[in-house]
Amino acid sequence: MSTVLVAGATQGTGRALAAEYARRGADVLITGRSQERATTAAEELAQETGGTVTGLALDLSRPADIEAALASVRHVDRVALVGMVRDMNTARAYDVATAATLATTKIVGYTAVVTTLFPGCPRTPRCCCSAAWRRTSRIRARRR
């Protein structure tokens, strides 16, 4: 049985991905910005799928807190990083703080999750946070 962490799985694509992993028999850890929301989504997914789903609080826009938030995670086989902050910025109404939060979430937050979990991942972790990561992982695996 594999263990999958889906960061940003309380709704949308992340929730659908977590549900599919749970249906296929994986132990699924999902994250959301609040513990209450993550726990509620995990309970609903477990009921819908019959799988094992656990909710954790994790705010990708606060990378300094990520290591502590993931301290209870001992092992993962796969990591899917799909959490994001919606950004409605336009050229006419551009907000630097909102853009910075989005960039922090997608770049620094994602990287903090991977570097925090890497010691517990298999030698060639399968992450689906982006096509670039998948290509890089395959290239590294071929080199070993």
Image: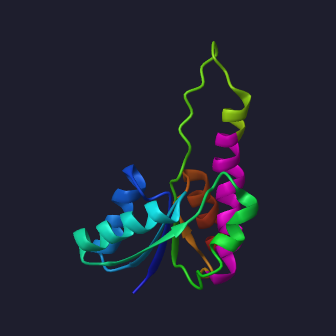
Question: Is residue 111 inside the magenta stretch?
Answer: yes
The quarter of the picture where the C terminus appears is bottom right
Res. 42 in view:
yes
Res. 144 in view:
no
Q: Quarter of the image holding residue 98?
A: top right
Nearer to the camera, 56 or 131: 56
User: How far across and down, in percent of the image, does residue 43 sit?
Assistant: 33, 71
What residue is drawn where x is 31% and y is 80%?
Answer: 25
Q: Is residue 34 left or right of residue 64?
A: left
Q: In this view, does 92 lie to the left or right of 108?
A: left
User: How far across and down, in percent of the image, does residue 16 sit?
Assistant: 34, 57
Question: Is residue 78 inside the magenta stretch?
Answer: no
Q: Relative to residue 122, is residue 92 depicted above or below?
A: above
Q: Relative to residue 44, is residue 1 depicted above or below?
A: below
Write the start and end of the magenta stretch as one range: 101-120
Coloration mode: rainbow
**Looking at the image, which residue sits at the far front?**
36
User: How far across and down, in percent of the image, does residue 24 sit?
Assistant: 29, 75
Q: Relative to residue 27, is residue 17 depicted above or below?
A: above
What residue is drawn where x is 37% and y is 63%?
Answer: 41
Nearer to the camera, 114 or 28: 28
Q: In this view, does 92 lie to the left or right of 77?
A: right
Q: Quarter of the image holding residue 28?
A: bottom left
User: How far across and down, in percent of the image, does residue 80 sit?
Assistant: 51, 63
Magenta stretch: dominant secondary structure: helix
The quarter of the picture where the N terminus appears is bottom left
